[in-house]
Structures are given as C-alpha cells and as structure tokens.
Image: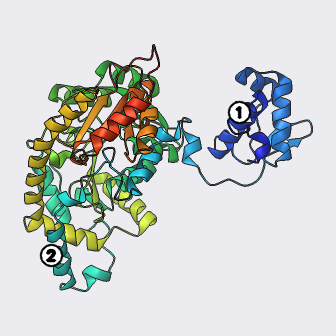
Amino acid sequence: MKAASRPAPGAAPTLVETVAAAITQRIAGRTLMPGARLPSVRAFAETMGVSKSTVVEAYDRLGAEGAIVARRGSGFYVAGKTRPLCLKTVGPQLDRAVDPLWITRQSMQAGPDLVLPGSGWLPAAWMPNAAIRRGLRHLARGPEANLVAHDQPLGFPPLRAQIARRLAEKGIEAEADQVVLVDSATQAVDLLCRFLLEPGDTVLVDDPCYFNYHALLRAHRARIVGVPLTPSGPDLGALADLMAEHRPRFYLTNSALHNPTGATLAPAVAHRVLKLAEAHDTLIVEDDIFGDFEGEPSPRLAGFDGLERVIQVGSFSKTLSAAIRCGFVVLREDWVEPLVDLKLAMSLGSGLLSATLMHTLLTDGTYRRHIAEVREKLARTMAPALRRLEACGLRAWLEPSGGFFLWMRLPDGMDSAEVARNALARGLVLAPGGAFSMSSLGNAFLRFNVAQCTDPRMIPLLEAALAASVPVPGRLAGSAA
C-alpha cells in the first residue's frame, strides 16, 4: 500500500485512512481475493460507522493506488493477482511485541548478550552434545544409504518400532505401522491441517495455548476458537457449549505439561473431554511434545481413546535437539496410507539421517540418561525460579508438576506487551501472554522458561522492565487464563 493511505508518523489515522486500511487488511489476509466484489459504499459505511462520503474517498484512494478497480454500474472489485500470504494481517492486529512470530524471531536470532527466559527450549549446555557427536560418528561409519538415501514412506522402521514401545509405556497401544515419521511436531500439525481441514473449518484450541498454533491454523484459513483452560484441563462447560455451537473439526491440545501454563489433564476431565468429542463428532489432536519431562506419565487422551478419535503428535526437538529434525504422528490404521500419500506429496518423505541418529540415541541409553538428568535439573530449578519471580511481584497461575514453563501473572494494571518491549530494550527476551491467548486475559501474563532463568542478569533486567512499565488504573490482571 502506498504512503498516501498511511497516517503520518505519530499521527492518529483519519477516518478515510482507517477505512482504506480495513480493505487493505482484508486483501492482504485473503479475505478478499482478486476479482472479489467489495462491500457496497452504503453497506461498508454502516459496518465501519462512517459516512458514505468517507467510504467513497477511501475507495477512490485505493483505486488510485491500483488496489481496487471500479466497474461502472457494478461496484468496486479487488484488482491484480493474489498476493503472498502475510500471517501478520490474517489474525488479530496485535502489537508487534505480542505477535507470536515476534517471540520466535527474537529467541532464534538472539546473540550471546541476550537473556532468554521467554524462549521455548532448554539451554544448549543441558543437551548431550558429546553423545550426539558420538552418534554422528557412528552413522558416518555405517551404510552409505543412511547418509544419502530417501527414507521409506512411513519412515525408518526401527525408530517407528521404538516409538511404539515408548507409547505403550504411556498407556497408548499402537503398532509400528500406525506411527508416521515427520520432521517435527510443527510439521505434523501442519500435515494434519492439510489432511483434515477445509478453509473456514473451526478448530478449538486452549486459551491460552502454544502461540504457533494460532499462526499455523491461520495459514490454513481455519476459524480459531479458544477454550478457557483450568489447572486440570479445559473448562468442561465451556468446551461443551463451544462444541455444540461451532461443530469444530478438531480440538488441538497438550494433555501433559501444557504450553504455556504447565497444567496437566486430570483423569476425570480426560474422560469427559472424550465423551464430548464423541457426542459432537469432533476429533482431537494431542500434542505430546513435553510428555517425556514427566516423571510418571499422566493420562493421555490417545490412551483412553485407543486412537479412534484422537491423533497424537510428538517430537524430540524439545527433549534432545532442535537440530535433529525428527517428529511423528500416531493415528488409526485406516488413515495411515492417505496421510503418508499427503506427506510424500509435500516433502518426498522425512529425513533418514535424523531418524537413524535418533534411533541410535534411543537404543544406546543416551536418551534415557539425558531425560533423567534433565528432570532432576528442572526439579532443582523450578522452586528457586518461582521464588525469584514472586519476589518481583509476579504470581504463579499454577505450580506445575514438571516441565520447564511457569505462567506468571503480572501486578494489576500491567500489560505484558509493554513489559516485553521494555525488557527487550534492556537485552531481555520475554514471552508476553497476549501471544498465547485468544482473549484479553492473556495480556496480564508472562511465560517463563525456568531452565533459562538461572542467568544472574535476569532478575535485575526484569525488575527494570517492570519499573518502566506504567500500570493502568482499573486494568486488573486476569483471574484465569
């Protein structure tokens, strides 16, 4: 969009600019496609609450810029070809500091001087780097096919068999041929969106939930509806009402060590969730990426359900290495072949080198020893991190049974986006709650990674960011997420 339709820097937009921006956003977000007819002047004036002359002027400006064209006696239409999808314009227009992609970019691009309590992964020093090097050397001496060949359609059979055995330890009965290897849990959810969704379908997510769910579902043109979360799982009354009202295609959730809250699904809640899903013909996609951080496995929806209505996804990116791209999908037998066909159409398969390396680390004892050590470190780190954050005036929504996330409520009147901006200016990357939530309640929270809270610089930087953030009278922190 050209500068003519933008407000001057620092100036509030005029009504004409506001109307023009609303149309531009719909075009960029593909709500209005090339050739689509724009709302009539009268209808859009009523929608925007402005005069017809304001809409006429806005349409004239957009026409002069070539964004729309007028057809005599017919109205205004979107001009040109389809523009590349811009996720920022598809969803709610959030402050860039609470944009999910902002968090990812800041964490991934961080230099050594930045402190990262808002990141979603363990410190590199906590990972079994020496064992991974040994595994790579072992593969280098093995068959050449492991280094250069495509993998089988479902993925490396020995690893799938190992994953099936590990699933059984969590109460999930699945054959190796029900396990489909992919490159990550994110790719798994993306694959399932392509497999299950049509544009406009409704998907339920927890509110709050992992922020990338929002971006990924928007990319698939799904309608996203948030289900309020409690410390024992979704609010069952709200879930029942939303399923009845929206008839969602599926419900996407973490059952164990939920991101960002750390909550774990209670058995009674799990049974009720499955009853509701059956009653409303709704599928469930269960993301179990943090499940291995549990000392004793909690209930899994996939285990109770027997993979009839539940599809489970997982990966080793959080537990072992983000560089070893290896994830999986576990689903009912009659869906495996069509899902694999879609996987092959998208990527010609998953990475054989990553799969064989992961199998080596699982079978030589590396993974078991590493996970045991990480659980111990997290157990030692959680309580001190919580005390330090509470001393800064934050309050825990829940003290998790494991994992590495704390969902912390800010002092009344503070906004997480403002705190995050002030923190970044001081070299501290935070995860503002608004990025995780479909409602305004998330704005009162920050997600902290306790494994990244051991840096002695963190608390002074956080205190400075909080001191620079001005509470707004009457704006209370949310009582629930």
Q: Foreground residue, 276 or 380?
A: 380
Left or right: where 20 falls relative to 449: right
Picture coordinates of residue 384 (x, y %)? 15, 37
Q: Quadrant of residue 435?
A: top left
Q: Residue 192, relative to residue 364: is it above or below?
A: above
State the colouring used for the structure image.
rainbow
Disc 2 marks a residue whose amino acid type is: Arg
Q: Quadrant of residue 395?
A: top left
Residue at point 46% right, 15% down?
A: 473
Picture coordinates of residue 97 (x, y %)? 48, 40
Q: Residue 105, relative to residue 74: is it above or below?
A: below
Residue at point 58% right, 49% down?
A: 86
Picture coordinates of residue 11 (x, y %)? 71, 33
Left or right: where 388 falls relative to 434: left
- Mark 1, secondary structure of its residue: loop
Q: Earlier in the sequence, mark 1 or mark 2?
A: 1
Disc 1 marks a residue whose amino acid type is: Ala
Q: Foreground residue, 302 or 40?
A: 40
Q: Residue 414, relative to residue 144: is it above or below?
A: above
Q: Foreground residue, 336 or 68?
A: 68
Residue at point 39% right, 62% down?
A: 343
- Mark 2, secondary structure of its residue: helix
Q: Which residue in the protein does label 2 denote?
A: 134
Residue at the outermost right position: 72
Left or right: where 115 falls relative to 221: left
Q: Which residue in the protein does label 1 denote?
A: 11
